[in-house]
Image (cartoon, rainbow, N blue to C red):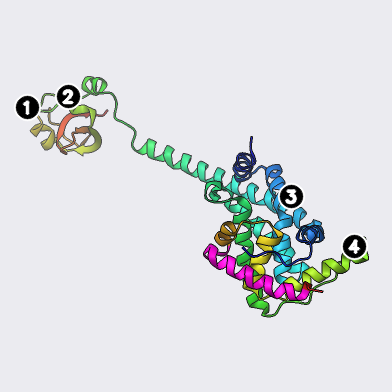
Amino acid sequence: MDGAEEERELLARTAKGDEQAFTTLFRRHSQSVYRFAYLMTGASGAADDVTQEVFIVLMREAHRVDPDRGTLIAFLQGVARNYVLRYLRQNQRCTALEQVAVMSDLDRHLDSLRVRRAVLALPARYREAVILCDFEGFKQEEAARVLGIPPGTVASRLHRAHGLLSRKFTP
Amino acid sequence: MSHSPFPDPEGARRLLADLRPSPHVEAELRVGFRGYHRLRRLRTWITSASLAAATCVIVLLMRPAAPPEALAAEFYPLPGVTITPAMLASSQIVRVELNGTTLAQLGLAAQAGPVEAELVLTQDGLPRAIRLLP
């Protein structure tokens, strides 16, 4: 059974109330959803809330998700984006980036923080394109579907975002 | 195509790999999932039970008439009527109280008081057969 077929089956089982299937989907995709929400909001509490809301939607709407119209992760990121935008509207400014409590390596911690800060400093419309394409590995066409914009616009936003970021990462 | 400005894009991805939701998110979602589906099952059960009850009531109310042959055996055709099974297949039975005059008009022996009877009404609403009740 290939990945898409397996995902389709997991969705069908989730719709029927199979908790194990739902948990499998959660463990498979929650990190990506959380990462997107965290890098967009800069707040772990908000990212937790967004992740929870996204999977509540999946819990209720699993029977409506059509894997033929796009990947499940694209659907989940689309839902996450709606919640993130609502959060950003309500909170206007991004919260200060939180420190991650447990990091094994200080350098790694600092590098990670630098990347997060740089991403968080981008305007939201550039930030979401960078997170989806650079960190989550979405193709531009797929990101375009999630963001509801033409692929060409994704490309131009990525280009501008990369321009802004490169200034921060150029020694 | 724009290239990622991160010094090491793969490295940047790896740096962010430790970003994951708090464990309580999964725990709360699983509890929520159980509750949601329990409620859904209950709702489905209640809906099915209500539908079954409603179906029973409708079936009882719209109980089909006795087979035409049985009706033909129990009822007397009214004057000038020839009862056919087809005529009785979609008929309805109504219970009425008939006085002596009406009974006489129907060609039945007149009685002093009212008599309870059942009439077979065909689809056109006309009485076709009668049965006097004891």
Residues packed near mark 4 inside 10 Å, few (<14), some (14 to 19) or many (20 plus): few
With respect to residue B41, does A135 lie above or below? below
Dot 4 or dot 3, earlier in sequence: 3
Please, what is the three-letter code of the amino acid marked with disc 3?
Arg
Please, what is the three-letter code of the amino acid marked with disc 4?
Met
Q: Quadrant of residue A7?
A: top right
Q: Chain of mark 4?
A: A
Question: To which residue does mark 1 refer?
Answer: B80
User: Mark 2, mark 4: which one is toward the viewer?
Assistant: 4
Residue A157 located left or right of residue A165? left
| Quadrant of the drawing holding the N terminus of chain A | top right
Residues tagged by mark 2 and mark 1 found on one chain of the structure: yes
Q: Position of residue B66 (x, y in %)?
A: 29, 26
| Magenta stretch encompasses residue A91 | no
Q: SS class of the residue under badge 2? A: strand
Tell me the magenta residue range: A147-168
Are circles 1 and 3 on residues that touch, CB within 8 Å? no
Residue drawn at point x = 73 percent, y = 67 percent? B5
Q: Position of residue A5 (x, y in %)?
A: 60, 39
Q: Chain of mark 3?
A: A
Rounded to the nearest angstrom, the CA distance separating label 1 from label 3 is 82 Å
Residues packed near mark 2 inside 10 Å, few (<14), some (14 to 19) or many (20 plus): some
Please, what is the three-letter code of the amino acid marked with disc 2?
Tyr
Rounded to the nearest angstrom, the CA distance separating label 2 from label 4 is 97 Å
Question: To which residue does mark 4 refer?
Answer: A103
With respect to residue A58, does A90 lie above or below? below
Question: To which residue does mark 3 refer?
Answer: A27
Residues tagged by mark 1 and mark 3 found on one chain of the structure: no
Q: Quadrant of residue B110?
A: top left
Q: Position of residue A61 (x, y in %)?
A: 57, 52
Question: To which residue does mark 2 refer?
Answer: B76
